Image (cartoon, rainbow, N blue to C red):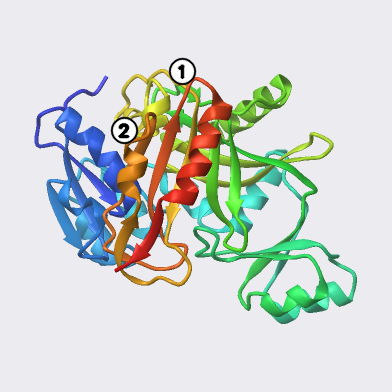
């Protein structure tokens, strides 16, 4: 076991300094692990919790390479980074997690889908198109049919790069980029499983969470943990997540989003090789948070227990519509007075509609009661501007 990162000058480099990086650094501070963060925003949330902070582009080869060359381990909190620089860092002896080859696949939703198909993993049928006109031609010629989902192959994030096309009028919103079109699943439920793995091959999965999304924004709004689903479905989802993290040779975390249709068929939607929005609640709910688990995986430490200590419901704090500017959290004190309400503010000074500004995890012995309180928080704690 490599325990030399504790209270030494061995260095973890983190590409991305957003809220995921900030929460990851809470564990590195607890363990006294030296960290260095790169982010293009000089006001990035993670800037105050790391040992070194560097402003620079995550997509620039030289910036990423020079950032990582004096690190012992390099990891990510966002996928959109220069993969070629990570490949070179790996060649020169820097430990890079996730593996750059896996990241290259995951960064292209088309390559993701082909990987699922090549490995006989369940996913909805799809076709590739070069642009909006090609999609329209495919629709006119009967190659694809309504309803469908269009996804840009590159650069999609937090709901961006996805269009749900139910009727002909929706085609006006089609993205004019290289993309895939996949069959729209007759959705019963959307769940996520977070798998973890270390370099010795130890694998552990958290229980499933159920996800509700903001209408019109395609962004996670409410998360229930753990969700009561058929035991066979839960076992299948964990089996698929475990197979994916092993076949992609990923150490750390892999979040796997699934669709379950009305016939109880399960389909992989998308994957992310990092701490994930669907795992925030593990900070308060689980024996080991996803952030600690990610560090355990990338440092080849024993994985922690994924036991659920208490049920929870997580609500995203999103910028309210109609408000942009210096942020103000209306009624935050009222929510803080409620037992079981755990508020996380990410440290973004400027709000805008639907921007992720924080999250609230509500813990309760009753999941139904936690859901009621979370809905109250959602209606009460409003992210406005001054």
Q: How many marks?
A: 2
Residue 168 visible (yes or no): yes
Q: Quadrant of residue 232?
A: top right
Residue 281 in the image: state x and y as whole percent: 43, 34
Q: For the residues marked 2 and 1, what is the alpha-carbon distance in whole angstroms?
A: 18 Å
Query: Residue at image x 45%, y 23%?
Result: 201
Q: Quadrant of residue 233?
A: top right
Query: Residue at image x 71%, y 80%?
Result: 172
Write down the residue under mark 1.
307
Q: Are marks 2 and 1 in contact (CB under 8 Å)?
A: no
Q: Is residue 194 left or right of residue 84?
A: right
Q: Quadrant of residue 82?
A: bottom left
Write down the residue under mark 2.
295
Name the quadrant of the C terminus: bottom left
For disc 1, the neighbor class at 10 Å (few under 14, some 14 to 19, many from 20) is some
In front: label 2 or label 1:
1
Viewer-closest of 316 and 115: 316
Among numbered discs 2 and 1, the one appearing first in the sequence: 2
Label of residue 16 in the image: none
Query: Residue at image x 20%, y 65%?
Result: 42
For disc 2, the neighbor class at 10 Å (few under 14, some 14 to 19, many from 20) is many
Residue 255 in the image: state x and y as whole percent: 51, 40
Viewer-closest of 75 and 32: 32
Viewer-closest of 26 and 378: 378
């Amino acid at each position: 076991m490599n325990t030399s990162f504790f209270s030494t000058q061995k260095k973890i480099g983190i590409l991305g300094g957003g809220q995921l990086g900030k929460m990851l650094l809470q564990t590195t501070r607890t363990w006294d692990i030296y960290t260095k963060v790169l982010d293009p925003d000089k006001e990035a949330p993670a800037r105050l919790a790391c040992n070194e902070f560097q402003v620079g582009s995550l997509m620039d080869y030289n910036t990423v390479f020079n950032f990582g060359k004096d690190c012992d381990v390099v990891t990510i909190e966002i996928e959109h980074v220069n993969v070629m620089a990570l490949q070179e860092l790996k060649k020169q002896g820097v430990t890079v997690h996730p593996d750059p080859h896996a990241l290259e696949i995951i960064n292209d939703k088309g390559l993701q889908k082909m990987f699922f198909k090549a490995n006989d993993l369940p996913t909805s049928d799809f076709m590739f198109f070069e642009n909006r006109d090609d999609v329209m031609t495919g629709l006119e010629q009967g190659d694809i049919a309504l309803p469908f989902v269009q996804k840009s192959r590159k650069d999609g994030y937090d709901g961006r790069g996805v269009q749900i096309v139910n009727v002909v009028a929706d085609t006006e919103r089609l993205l004019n980029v290289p993309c895939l079109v996949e069959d729209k699943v007759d959705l019963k439920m959307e769940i996520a499983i977070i798998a973890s793995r270390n370099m010795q091959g130890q694998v552990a999965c958290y229980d499933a969470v159920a996800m509700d999304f903001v209408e019109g924004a395609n962004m996670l709004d409410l998360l229930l943990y753990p969700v009561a689903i058929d035991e066979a479905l839960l076992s299948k989802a964990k089996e698929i997540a475990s197979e994916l993290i092993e076949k992609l040779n990923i150490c750390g975390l892999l979040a796997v989003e699934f669709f379950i249709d009305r016939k109880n068929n399960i389909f992989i939607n998308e994957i992310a090789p990092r701490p994930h929005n669907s795992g925030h609640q593990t900070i308060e709910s689980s024996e080991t948070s996803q952030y600690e688990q990610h560090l355990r995986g990338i440092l080849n430490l024993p994985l922690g227990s994924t036991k659920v200590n208490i049920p929870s419901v997580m609500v995203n704090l999103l910028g309210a519509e109609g408000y942009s500017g210096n942020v103000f959290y209306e009624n935050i004190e009222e929510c803080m007075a409620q037992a079981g309400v755990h508020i996380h503010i990410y440290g973004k000074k400027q709000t805008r509609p639907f921007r992720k500004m924080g999250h609230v995890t509500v813990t309760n012995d009753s999941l139904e009661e936690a859901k009621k309180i979370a809905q109250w928080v959602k209606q009460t704690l409003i992210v406005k501007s001054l």
